Image (cartoon, coloured by chain):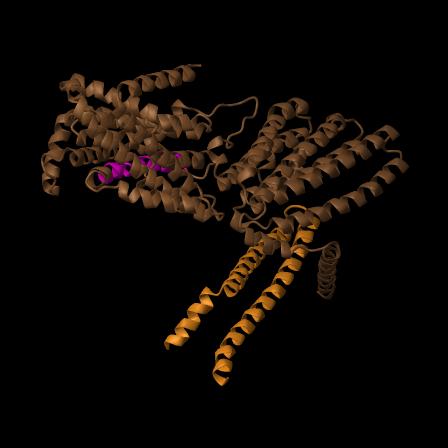
Amino acid sequence: MFRRVVLLSIFAILSYGFWISPNLKQITAGVAIFLFGMLALEEGFKAFTGGLLEKILKKTTNGLWKSMSFGVVTTTLMQSSSLVSVITISFLSAGLITLASGIGIIFGANLGTTTGAWLVAGLGLKVNISAYAMPMLVFGVILVLQKPKELKGIGYILAGLGFLFLGIHYMKEGFESFREHIDLTTYAMSGFKGLLLYTLIGIAATVIMQSSHATLVLIITALASQQITYENALALAIGSNVGTTVTAIIGSISANINGKRLAAAHLVFNVVTGLVAIALIAQLVDSVDWLSERLGIASDNYTLKLAVFHTLFNLLGIALMLPFINKLGAMITKLLPEKQHEIAEPLYLNNASLELPEMALEAVRKETLNLYQYFFGIVCHGLSFRVRDIKSYLPVEDIIKSQRKPIPVNIKEEYTNKIKGLYAEIVNFIGKANENMTQDQSNEVFELRSAGRAMLESIKSTQHLHKNLSHYINNSNPYIRAEYNQIRFRLGTILRALSDMQKDPDEHRTALATLESMKIGIIEADKKFFVDMNKLIRDKHISGVMATSLMNDHSYTNIIANKLIEIASILFKSQDTEMHEIEKSLMLDEDEMAEAVAARKRSENLDSDKGSIDCEDK
Amino acid sequence: MKISELIAKADDYIGAENRKRKSKINCLKHVLNKLRKREKKLELKFAEGRGSKEKISNELALIHAHRKKGLKLLKELKEEHKEAKINKEEKPSDESAD
């Protein structure tokens, strides 16, 4: 409702403005074209995501200086700190970078965005950039109409730059004609009051335009046509720096807690920098004068001096905050803690990553692993194991011996609270993300979706098994107790193997061989089960009811075991596609597996025979 | 080194097919190395009698078979690579004979 009112008010104010001043039309059209150019530029850079951008980001953000440099370079190239912050938030939400690296990128982006002021003040106002805008737009639009993604991307970038240049041109022209009719400098305010008021105006303008870059260009063009004073322009620049955090805050609304933390860090950094700039305004102005003199900037070239000021106070902010980057991260983490949910909520799925297919795939992978953690816990409890025991190095037999009492667990409730909703979110997210994905990426997310489905099915079988298992592991009949503990042992060893597999880093994992041996284990256990059960019935150790329960639960056990293998083969396969293909090509068919196991047994028998002959000889 | 040889070397490096094969060989070597490490770890476990002997024995049997299959594949790939190299070296001399 509030948004609608604001939007309507802006429309009303602008309409009135257009009616009373045709120059305002030109200036605002310039701002609109400039913003449209930024959107086109963002669209263009997105064409190169889903590979290159992510790879660069992954490699260049593993250290504070690296991530800061990354922020500077990418923002300079893209001329959009918003795109860089949104990508950073989505990377952080997907768990690919740490909060400290994310803060480093944001620091760098703040410095990178100051290059915009240099470009506009240095080139934009002196050169007739609209002359470059026209061919850029023509070539850009031709390329946008091409089919290949890369050409389309280049087209958007060219068209975006064209619109940016055109927007600057219109703003410049607008202010120049404006000067002839109205003199805005009559509204200039000096002193501390003026500083504060114009800082607030700068914040408001940036919040409305959602771009500090656009605000800054507007300030520079207004300053160039002497519509605002230098002093007020400095205050507006400070305001635009604070106002830009709103974009990141809006972007983090749909992000997870880490994204929110990054947006908070961004806000803290920019507000602190702004306050320091206000407090030290006199010293900063003196420093700008001194530096401008050294750089050969004329004392009356206020636009370039504004660019110097913008860079200087951002540098000052970085210098002040850099030593406290870890403390800042820790403080924000403390202020925005991770919620302990009774009901599982997605940690990695957010709208920001929906636009970047590779990010979306990573988010789905991480979220499925998050779902798996809940699933693992439910299955462990359903079998009366503690998760920490299964994840330990204690032999499974010892765990079974020590944990004879069933662990009370409401599987149905756990399933509803922790699995069903989260899985629905994953399915929903996949449905949306799949639209922009390549065939390979689609196959990958569908595979992850089927892993989630297998978890659901496995939990349903665990629920059935849990009833009898809780009853019989405490039963006075030692035979039925042993049979149910055997079921626990079978599934416990698989759970242990899965836990070990997850602990192993990807480059050391040999999942396929382990999973194949588990499959053999299931087949052998199946054969053994019927032999053992027939004997128990024959010897009247168990009743008919017990035998029926055991048979049903045996089939549930097989379902759970097979589903666990299916899940592991998807979640713990090699992340490197080529490596995974190689591993798949080494997989064995049933005959080869049987032959391999038989050959090993033969050699083991030979060894033991040899051993016994040696002993006899001795 | 002559320029023609240098170009041939660069071509050999840049050649897509060749690069693909080389990367496959490297990947396979990495997988074999992983399997060998796992095999050693399991053999130690088996010898110490930790965990289910039968299960470890089965996994060892499968890893052994995987490695055998992998080594065979590696040999084939290396031979293919060698043949492609020989064919490439023969090609310019054939052209000069024409």
* Residue A62 visible in this rendered orientation of the protein: no
B88 on left or right of A405? left
**Residue placed most toward the observer, A615 or B53:** B53
Residue at point 11% right, 42% down? A296
Rendered colour, chain A: brown
Residue A594 to residue A489: above or below: below
A200 on left or right of A378? left
Q: Position of residue A256 (x, y in %)?
A: 47, 28
Q: Main secondary structure of the magenta part?
A: helix
Say which quadrant the N terminus of chain A sits in. Answer: top left
The quarter of the picture where residue A614 lies is bottom right
Q: Position of residue A276 (x, y in %)?
A: 21, 26
Residue at point 59% right, 54% down? A581
**Residue placed most toward the observer, A143 or A75:** A143
Residue at point 30% right, 19% down? A19
Q: Position of residue B6 (x, y in %)?
A: 39, 73
Q: Position of residue A126 (x, y in %)?
A: 19, 40
Magenta region: A98-119
Say which quadrant the C terminus of chain A sits in. Answer: bottom right
| A99 within the magenta span | yes
The quarter of the picture where residue A53 lies is top left
